[in-house]
Amino acid sequence: MRKNKLIVANWKVNGSKTLCEEYRNLSDFQTRSDLVVCPPYPYLGQFNTHSISLGSQNVSIYQSGSHTSHVSVTMLKEFGCEYCVIGHSEVRDTFGDSDSIVRAKARLLLNEKITPIICVGEDESIRNSGQHLDFVNNQLKQGLPYFEFGESVKEIVIAYEPIWAIGTGNTASLTQIEDMAREIQSMVAYFYQHFSHLSVTVLYGGSVNPNNAKEILSQPSVDGLLIGGASLVPRNMEQILSFC
Ligand code: PEP
């Protein structure tokens, strides 16, 4: 289990040089947390501080070549990315990323020693049908990367983001969050049962804000947060970081 809470800001297609500067000043507010910022690609070069880690919102499946608009894992490495979000529901939806693509991207990232943040989560109809645990279990079984023989991976990060909670203001209840986070912890530990040094980090994402972050962070199986909309306001982040 990781020592500090992991707080990941996903700016999506938002942000500016000014927001980058405001984030650089957030370093004073970090207590027992590790802050990762995932800005749009053009802003990746704007963070030269050691107290904020850089993450990407996605990565290409291609290493190089004629694939207009793609950004490779090597480029992310060159810009200092330590984390990369993959399998976000918006990316699955817009670009058709399947679990097997998520697995392949995770493998490419691990090759460059970038920690994948693998997003999983059910939509509303699956939640209402009571199949959410099976659904997420299946996403993990199909999407988790295999490790190479002798490879030592320190951390794997899974973000539980119920689709019905993303950007809707309908945060999952504490019981729903804890039940799923606990399941994910045990599913992933089982998948990697032969890798005893691996730390499994489970994040919750879906309409997190300063009013609900403290309680969510206090759930025993939750190691951190993936924050979209609320992360665009630095004052929100100051407050959320102060709960860690
Ligand atoms: C997200 O997009 O990863 C997310 C959690 O968004 P929001 O916090 O806005 O629901």
Image: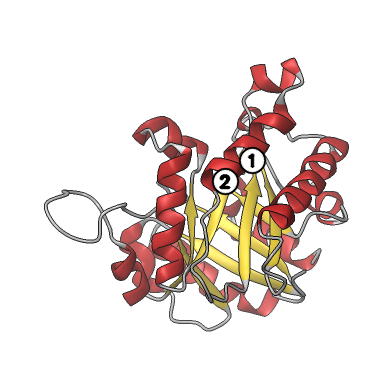
Which residue lies at the image location 70% right of the left edge and 75% below the top edge? 197
Residue 174 percent across, percent down from the top left: 85, 40
N-term mark: 2 or 1: 2
Whether pointer 2 and pointer 1 mark residues with C-beta atoms closer than 8 Å, the reply is yes
Q: Secondary structure at mark 2?
A: strand
Give the labeled residue for mark 2. Answer: 119
43, 135: nearer the viewer: 135
Q: What kind of residue is marked 2?
A: Cys
Q: State whether residue 134 is above or below residue 20.
A: above
Q: Is residue 207 visible?
A: yes
Residue 233 percent across, percent down from the top left: 59, 54
Q: Is mark 2 within 8 Å of ligand 1?
A: yes
Q: Is residue 170 visible?
A: no
Q: Furthest residue to the left?
A: 66
Marks 2 and 1, how far apart in space?
A: 7 Å
Q: What kind of residue is marked 1?
A: Glu
Among the 4 quarters of the image, the one containing residue 240? bottom right
- Quadrant of picture, ligand 1: top right
Q: State whether residue 86 is above or below residue 7.
A: above
Give the labeled residue for mark 1. Answer: 161
Horizontal arrangement in the rendering, residue 193 relative to residue 229 (left or right): right
Q: How many marks?
A: 2
Q: Is mark 1 within 8 Å of ligand 1?
A: yes
Which residue lies at the image location 36% right of the left edge and 55% below the top edge? 59
Q: State whether residue 177 is above or below residue 35.
A: above
